[in-house]
Amino acid sequence: MAFYFVSTFANAQTPTKQRPYGYRGLKIFTSLKLRFQDFQRGFIGIGLMGHPMTLRLLTAGYRVNVWNRTTEKLQAVTQAGAIPCASITDLVAQSDIILLCLADTPIVENIVKQQILPQGKQHKLLIDLSSTHPETTRQLAQLLNKDCAMDWVDAPVSGGVACATNGSLAIMAGGTEKAVDIARVILKPLYTQLTHMGDVGSGQVTKVCNQMIVSCNVLVIAEMLALAERSGVDTNKIATALAGGFADSKPLQIVAPEMASGKFTPVKWRVKTLLKDLNMATDLANRQSTATPMSALAAQLMQLHGNHRCQPRTG
């Protein structure tokens, strides 16, 4: 069980595409992979992102224990070989690596304090794939380490459902070097790039920065399409026309065709998720005495959109 016996491998902090491991590094990486192959993963949160990520881990040949608040969502992953657990405490007791992919900070905090801490043990590792408030992340990691000597890696992801499905997520990780090295191997089926950003919490700060860019981008795309449509332009051609230019981006190529056609299924991301992350951005900016007027405005506009969508229809 003491998987920290194998320490860091060559150039672990640098993605493979940027710096090859070399012969010795590749041997160590391979030994790490083989060593962790038999370790049981426990995945908590089989939602929009957790579902395809769990399937990726199963396809890679890993044993995965799963738990979800809504048990109906477990059907597809259990049919693929995942092992359902009756409770989170059962999952933690049976798993070496605990993976979280949950909706927001309060849920993560509640599950860690109420369900994971009582079963936590040394040599287990918690990897939080959720987008969680950086300060809460640091507090929970400290609590987990103090009470049961478990390490914590915050590893929020970017790329949406499509990248989770094909294993091309970008992961920004925070934690000790040895813990992130282990996460790099454990999460290998999920990503094309994993960057060690620094200590615990730094991965979550980086995800907040990511969401600031994405959210503001999406709002400008919506404005742009409305203007183009009013001006008589075929908005279905916008994404193609701008591809490869300075205005191009993944959000443009994903959401512009959906906005132009008015078809938003299957759901690739949710407004409430972006709003939650923007609210974290404004809170973090206040704590750091940094002005973020564009992100704050984006949060207000998304809140207005959410309120409008939730208003009951009359007549």
Image (spheres, grey):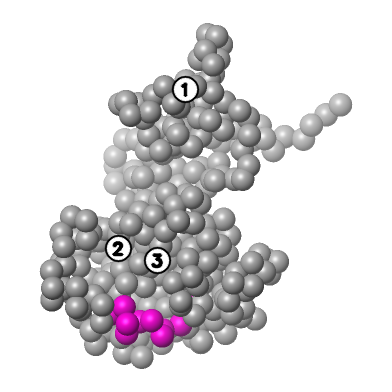
Q: Residues within 10 Å of mark 2 (few under 14, many from 20)?
A: many
Say whether residue 263 is left or right of residue 198.
right
Q: Which residues are magenta?
A: 32-42
172 magenta-colored: no
The residue under the point 69% across, 38% down is: 310
What amino acid is found at the position of numbered circle 3 in the picture?
A: Pro
Picture coordinates of residue 141 (x, y %)?
36, 71
Say whether residue 60 is left or right of residue 178.
right
- Badge 2 marks a residue whose secondary structure is strand
Disc 2 to disc 3: CB gap under 8 Å = no
The circle drawn on residue 285 is: none
Q: Residues within 10 Å of mark 1 (few under 14, many from 20)?
A: some
38 magenta-colored: yes
Which residue occupies the extreme right position in the image?
Answer: 315
The circle drawn on residue 238 is: 1
Query: Foreground: 241 or 9?
Result: 241
What amino acid is found at the position of numbered circle 1 in the picture?
A: Ile
Q: CA distance from mark 3 to mark 1?
A: 34 Å
Picture coordinates of residue 212 (x, y %)?
39, 40
